[in-house]
Image (tube, helix red, strand yellow):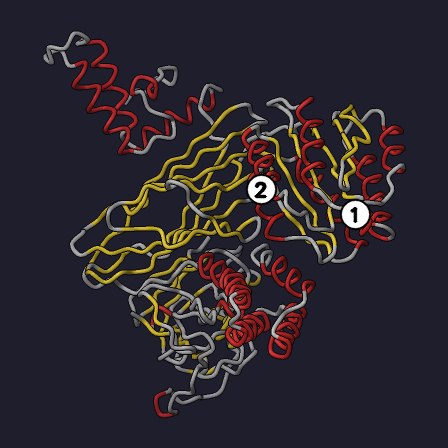
Amino acid sequence: MKIDPRKELYAILDVLPTATQKEIKRAYRRLARRFHPDSGAKEASIERFRDVEEAYRILSDEKTRQAYDKQRAELGIGYQAALNWNIVPSREKLPTGPEEQMFYLLVEVFPAEGIEARRLPLNLCLVIDRSTSMNGERLKYVKTAAHRIVDDLEDDATLSIVGFSDRAEVLMPSSPIADRTRAHASIASMWAGGGTEILHGLKAGLEQLRHRHRDEVVSYLILLTDGRTYGDEEKCLAEARRAGLERIGISALGIGEDWNDAFLDDLVRQAEGVSAYISYPQQILAVLRDQVRGLGGLFARRVQLTLRFSEHAWLASAFRTAPHFEYLVPADGVLTLGTLHIGKLMQVLLEIVVSAPDAQQGRLVQLDLAADLPSLGRDERLLQDVEVEFVADPPKEAVPTLIVNTLGRLSVFRMQKDAWQALEDGRQDEARQRLERVATRLLDMGEDDLAHRVLIEAGRVAQGGRASDKGYKTIKYSTRSLGIG
Amino acid sequence: MIECPSCGKKHRPGTLFCTECGVYLSTGGALRTSPLATDELPKSRGATMERTSPEERSKGARSLRVHILESGRQVQLSATSELLVGRLDAAHGIFPDLDLTGDGGLEKGVSRRHAKIIQRGGEFFVEDVGSANGTFLNDQRLTPYLPYPLNKSDQLQIGRIKLQIAWDDQ
């Protein structure tokens, strides 16, 4: 078959270059009916009909389609997908019957090979808690870290610095980092005193970021705090939500044991950021640097996965398993996955319940991934049907190692979460038992230090009915990272 | 429903990990490989270290095709210098390249870390890594932790599971 790579076959069929065979077939049927010379329709045209026929002939056969795509790519006119994914089902075949079955789907999303994404200029705001409790070591190390960040920033970055206690001051209004002396001076001028009201700092910081926020820059607010904010949580979350919609990110570093982890986790989730736990002031520099470095390599933001289930299947639970473990709660069938960085991988694990009394073969779920790629200035979409075969007596299949490995580590994270829930509900005995099981699993995995930590907290729960804040935060934020690597 | 062997919680079929205690349900997690009755196993005739002729050896890392005779399953293993054969136990961090769990591995005496297939200098070797029920090459029980050269027509036996291994010449 002769293939002319200059012909816009996808456009003729009115489908995306990433279209599935099913979509191509559907488009062909629709257009063939419309343009068929005998259709009697006003648009009937033998030329258009022939074009549609030819496009379908080439694109409906994966071999000729690939040849066409390849020739176009060589001419530099091909569509190059910027995102790629890898969809791994736990089984290919499921038994027929009314009994509900558990089925797992692992989805990995990563930048496509050969895509050159440029680093975007960073528009950064450091919002620093300078309440009385920060006095001494903590503020000292925060200042040292901030000085280093100023030196590290690329020359095209802009920086603003906000200090807050029960009120906020803009220590340095948003300005190009070229003026490093001014940044250093404003960091040095910070002193500790007053209460902690995050809302003031958050608002002042976001306002600075908005001055310089554009589509082609990465705007992020990094909040460093060691305390709880009282009474303004709801307003903070509303601010974060608004920032998220404007594509301004918020990350938070909690220092010490007194900050409210549930609140900060919630805050950063609204605006595609990450929260981190810093148990010793000496760690501030490393964690902050790591965060800032990651921001420049932003590849995709607002990554969202829409799930369209068939009547045979429904979602039991969903997790993001990389960069770190996180429960995902679908809103109208959409999972919000956050950001993807250059050279990194995003991983989602879906637990799906399947019940197929009479099905033969079919689609369990359609995965529809959408993302905003700021460094390429475009949106991207990936679409895939996940199908399984239903048979009376399916053969035993080996579950892919990747799924077993991920699930095994994830189960530890889930178990610790259940343990804290039991403790919160006043079921101390159950909490202790659950913590001991977490410790057993951790020992099996070779995570001896963390296992030891968990056992200490289990002992505390057994004796005094509660765990230490430090132990709780260490366990929570460490098990969250078990999946990495 | 299936029941967790460790804590008794019931789960839907197909569930891989117990949400209560984290046990891997496909193998029952901490379950050990139990020694098989000795009369079920071929007699050990002591290990030999016969070398293959140079013609039979080939070069470069190649992928292996494994035919599991018990289940009829055929597996293609990627070309790496060392492949672990055994039973998957995620909780203990054991992820064999060739996982025999689905081929009746537990009942047939396969250890979690059972044997290794090694590629070195274009030749294949098999080494038992201290399995409970032994590795057999053409009905000879191998001395653990000693590599034995593997030829194409050889029959390899892991516990009581027989494998046929093949590879392409280059």
Task: Judge whether A461 appears above or below A413 on screen.
Answer: below
Residue underneath mark 1: A285
Chain at numbered mark 1: A
* Residue at (42, 37) in percent of width and height: A369
Chain at numbered mark 2: A
Q: Is residue A126 visible?
A: yes
User: Which-is-in-front pick, marks 2 and 1?
Assistant: 2
Q: Who comes first in sequence, dot 2 or dot 1?
A: 2
* Residue at (45, 88) in percent of width and height: B45
Residue underneath mark 2: A234
In the picture, the disc for residue A294 is none
For the residue pair A328 and A79, the one nearer the viewer reads as: A328
CA gap, disc 2 and disc 1: 30 Å
User: Residue B98: x, y in percent?
Assistant: 44, 65
In the image, taking residue A474 as reference, residue B134 lies left or right, namely: left
For the residue pair A376 and A180, the one nearer the viewer reads as: A180
Q: Amino acid at mark 2?
A: Glu
User: Residue B77: x, y in percent?
Assistant: 44, 58
Across the whole image, how many numbered discs are drawn on residues? 2
